[in-house]
Image (cartoon, rainbow, N blue to C red):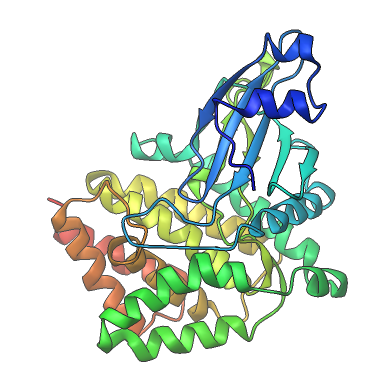
């Protein structure tokens, strides 16, 4: 595999005929944030449309050693294709071309004037309307792919999901915290035994972009764009719910003094998801994923960097209790967290 970077991407695009020599010499490349698993680069083309090239790597950029098969890039490509058919236009980027030998594909670029929702949350912006829209969006994805036999066949392999989620999140923690091992191992087993719909596996604020609308009359309602789908598979929707909620609750803990605002946004997300007619068969299962994912972001292979030591202790305390004796409703977990934050608001 030819590993590409800003120093040789233009040459590659020229040599493969993606850019003409005349255009290539005037084009430029900028590295983008690709999380820990991929190289992502934006190509600016004079008098043309920018596009993004994404290439997978075998070794991920984490402190702990972490490998995953580079073939995961094709799972992302397949999930993008599915999402383009079951979601409104503009929610996901359009695919442009792919290179199987070099484990890469290209897609349309999002306008530079966009905001990564994670940044807004870390800055303390808890937008209830975005929470509601994301609940509706995830419900649409889950509902639109439920019991799809073709997708079950195409996306049923969960090797990549295991490598990037279950192993570094759940097993990694279980190996180090014997008290929680039975609960986490049981959660893994139940997750792998459930195959209901398309599960994104990375429905996260870092993968949600806010693009300001070109229409001045709608300037306060940004367009939502979703990116990064290599962990997508046909599986358990409770994982998406727990994973996403874990991100929101970690941000809630960070902004403890404004927890009421953040929890209102969380509740709006949950209400919108359920309001779309989707009622998790076992809401407790979503709470278990929520607890396991929160704990993994403190003690797993890929940890968050924005929590104080006091906040991390709160996460460990509450997730331990939820894993050993899970609330049977998401609302019960939110109420419990709100009570604890009010009692320890100095975190």
Residue at (51, 79) in percent of width and height: 285
The x and y percentages for residue 248 are 41, 53
Between 13 and 334, the one nearer to me in the picture: 13
Is residue 91 visible in the rendered image? The answer is no
Image side of residue 2 versus residue 36, left or right: right
Q: Quadrant of residue 193?
A: bottom right
Residue at (12, 50) in percent of width and height: 346
Q: How many marks?
A: 0
139 to 25, vertically: above or below: below
Image side of residue 333 versus residue 267, left or right: left
Image side of residue 132 versus residue 101, left or right: left
Image side of residue 300 versus residue 101, left or right: left
120 to 150, vertically: above or below: above
336 to 275, vertically: above or below: below
The x and y percentages for residue 134 are 60, 48
Q: Quadrant of residue 52?
A: top right
Between 343 and 94, the one nearer to me in the picture: 94
The x and y percentages for residue 216 are 66, 14
168 to 134, vertically: above or below: below
Is residue 296 visible in the rendered image? The answer is yes
Between 56 and 147, the one nearer to me in the picture: 56
Between 184 and 53, the one nearer to me in the picture: 53
The x and y percentages for residue 90 are 75, 35
Residue at (80, 27) in percent of width and height: 18
């Amino acid at each position: 595999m030819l590993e590409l970077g800003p120093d040789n991407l233009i040459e590659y695009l020229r040599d493969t005929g993606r850019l003409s020599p005349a255009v290539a010499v005037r084009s430029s490349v900028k590295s983008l944030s690709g999380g820990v698993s991929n190289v992502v680069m934006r190509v600016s083309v004079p008098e043309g449309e920018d596009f993004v090239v994404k290439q997978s790597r075998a070794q991920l950029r984490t402190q702990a050693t972490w490998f995953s098969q580079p073939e995961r890039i094709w799972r992302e490509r397949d999930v993008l294709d599915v999402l383009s058919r079951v979601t409104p236009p503009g929610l996901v980027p359009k695919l442009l071309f792919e290179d199987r030998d070099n484990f890469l594909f290209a897609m349309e670029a999002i306008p530079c004037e966009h905001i990564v929702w994670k940044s807004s949350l870390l800055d303390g912006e808890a937008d209830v309307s975005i929470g509601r829209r994301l609940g509706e969006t995830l419900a649409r994805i889950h509902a639109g792919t439920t019991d799809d036999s073709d997708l079950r066949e195409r996306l049923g392999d969960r090797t990549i999901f295991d490598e990037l989620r279950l192993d570094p999140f759940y097993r990694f923690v279980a190996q180090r915290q014997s008290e929680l091992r039975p609960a986490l191992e049981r959660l893994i087993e139940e997750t792998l035994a459930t195959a209901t719909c398309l599960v994104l596996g990375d429905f996260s604020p870092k993968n949600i972009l806010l693009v300001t609308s070109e229409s001045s009359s709608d300037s306060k309602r940004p367009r939502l764009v979703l990116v990064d789908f290599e962990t997508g598979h046909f599986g358990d929707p409770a994982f998406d719910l727990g994973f996403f909620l874990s991100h929101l609750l970690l941000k809630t803990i960070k902004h403890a003094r404004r927890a009421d605002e953040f929890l209102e946004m969380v509740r709006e997300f949950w209400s919108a998801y359920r309001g779309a007619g989707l009622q998790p068969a076992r809401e407790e299962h979503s709470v278990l994923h929520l607890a396991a994912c929160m704990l993994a972001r403190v003690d797993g292979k890929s940890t968050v960097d924005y929590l104080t030591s006091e906040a991390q202790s709160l996460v460990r305390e509450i997730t331990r209790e939820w894993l050993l004796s899970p609330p049977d409703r998401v609302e019960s977990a939110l109420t419990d967290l709100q009570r604890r934050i009010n009692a320890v608001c100095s975190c």
